[in-house]
Image: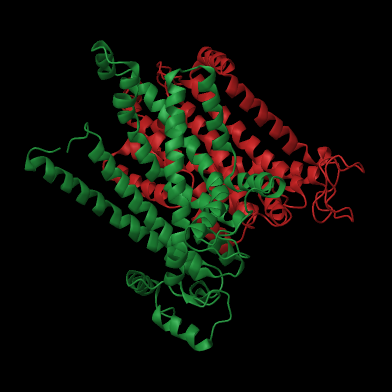
Amino acid sequence: MSSGSDAGRGVWAYVLGRVLNAVPLVLGVIVVNFLLMTLAPGDPVTALVGDYPAPADYVERVRQQYGLDRPVPERLVRYVASVMRGDLGYSFANRQPVVTLLVERLGRTLVLMLTTVVIASAVGLTLGVVAARRPHSATDAAATGFALAGYAVPEFWLGQLLILVFAVWLQWLPAGGFRSVRESYEGFAALLDHARHMLLPMAALSFRYMAITTRLTRASLLEVMNTQYIVAARARGLSERTILWRHALRAAALPVVTVIGYNFGFIVAGSALVETVFGWPGIGRLMYDSIFTRDYPVLLGILLMVSVTVIVVNLVTDVLYSVLDPRVRY
Amino acid sequence: MTTPEATVRVPGAAGGSGSARAAWRRFRRHRGGLFGLAVVLLLVVVAVFAPALAPHDPFTTSRNSFLPPLAGSGYVLGTDHLGRDLLSNLIWGARVSLLVGVAAALTATIIGVIVGAFAGYIGARADELLMRITEFFQVIPRFVLALIVVAFFGSGLVNLILVIGLLSWPQTARLVRSQYLSHKTMQYVDAGRALGMRDLKLIFAEILPNVMAPVLVVTSLDVAQAILLEASLGFFGLGDPNLPSWGAMLNAAQDYIRRAWWMSVFPGLGISLAVLGFNLLGDGLTEAYDPRMRVR
């Protein structure tokens, strides 16, 4: 797109600026983690070990490693250093280092979240276009009503309703889990089995996101349709269809990209709730279990990981937006 | 009389009874907003008169566990696994939801207004610093952080309200900041300054009333978000253990979903209706205050 090296340099300067901007945010997250740990009632070592009966010499080692007998500033430095090394502690309830545990569970959550984002964006964009094509028509009202419901219905309740209808009453789909326990499938059949288990959680998780995308697409499309270049396109005699799909939607879809970044944190939260409903063994289910086992290092590790992910996704979508939008100049 | 002529017509601001009447007229035309208002009023009535409306004590267990709705014996919506009356729990749950929702949203509004007002009015370094803090609170995952704070420090009512409020103010702050940025250069503010008014007075006594209308819209939407967040925490077993809450009811329902659909269906309807009500009220208020403005 860029003809001269000037524009190229502009992009990189922008990206670099955004990355530098993200660094204090990440540091801030680590400090918040540290504060939670320090201020938590009881022995601070509990926040690092969990409420699980851990061997006394391990507890003592943690105390030494994090300098829990040292003044607060020194403890903060030690904590930041160990996080930077990728050391988030050890989960005794799961008998695994926290990092290993999180990485293991992350994949399953990502599968759920990414398919949700893709499908919900596609459906939301389509509904938004259909609604905006004839504003204030019955179709528009239906799409708007759908969006309103999506904003109001909590994911975890929708999950329960889906279980009631499709698993308990109709018995079409499994009520939960990651795969069938009684059968052992191989190859394509195993994949199909996973997909069947994923269908309901995905539906529960994507509803709100579809609503957000629908509403946003509709609003931005209505705005774009009134701009001069669309009027100019009409004057050139282009068909409404070409104008809508080739010209208007391209501009209107841009905010949808940012909304992925902005709402990523909400999808993570929704995923945690939905995983709990369906017994999906991802990060969210781990969070739920860790509350009851008082596995604090795992909880703090999840907070850290999710926060950093949200910051990175925001960064990426911001950069993507600036690259996609021809109006952005550096 | 030290107050200068502060009734300058500010576009979109609610000043004077004439514009309030016009705003009400616009609100009345917004059917969704009216519906939202009706739902909110209903919730308030149910919450306030919960002790009189609930047919049973919400905590009293009985041997009639898992009674389906309308099965007679005085349990209209049935009973849960411990034989407690579902309707009574639903009614008392409205009280907790509304209380947490409104109190948390007000907390968020107060913080957001203070941060936004100072950032917008003072500008420069203070603005930059305050906006960086706001950005931080915007990217940090609310649900996960709230969950951990409540798990660490206890899930009493006050904790819930404070945590949700402290994590919900960024949107208000950004809105208020942008309002102050444009208002601080307006004539009525200049006039006040010329009369020797102090900055604090200008910020809170002069400008604030003129920017409250859009802030109220965000507050209404914040109530909806806070109700959702409280329900989510309750579903994760982190509600106030001494109070009936819709989220906690859904947590219990999860274990008996094959046996008692009513334990899941009714509390979820309550949450959805409450959230829908405050969202629609916010939409109606947007329409009343300024039809061109959209906050989401």
Q: Quadrant of the C terminus of chain A?
A: top left
Q: Can residue A196 be seen from the camera position used here?
A: yes
Residue at 61%, 61% (x, y): give it: B154
The chain drawn in red is: B
Asked whether, in this view, residue B187 is left or right of residue A155, the answer is left
What hue does chain A carry in this figure? green
Residue B169 coordinates in the image, percent (x, y): 46, 43
Q: How is the image coloured?
A: by chain
Q: Can residue A39 be seen from the camera position used here?
A: no
Total marks shown come to 0
Residue A92 coordinates in the image, percent (x, y): 53, 77
Residue at 8%, 41% (x, y): give it: A6
Residue at 52%, 27% (x, y): give it: A143
Q: Quadrant of the N terminus of chain A?
A: top left
Q: Is residue B235 above or below residue B222?
A: below
Instruction: Work out whether residue B198 or residue A214 is closer to the camera in this orientation and state it.
Output: A214
Query: Can you name the residue that lies furthest to the bottom here?
Result: A57
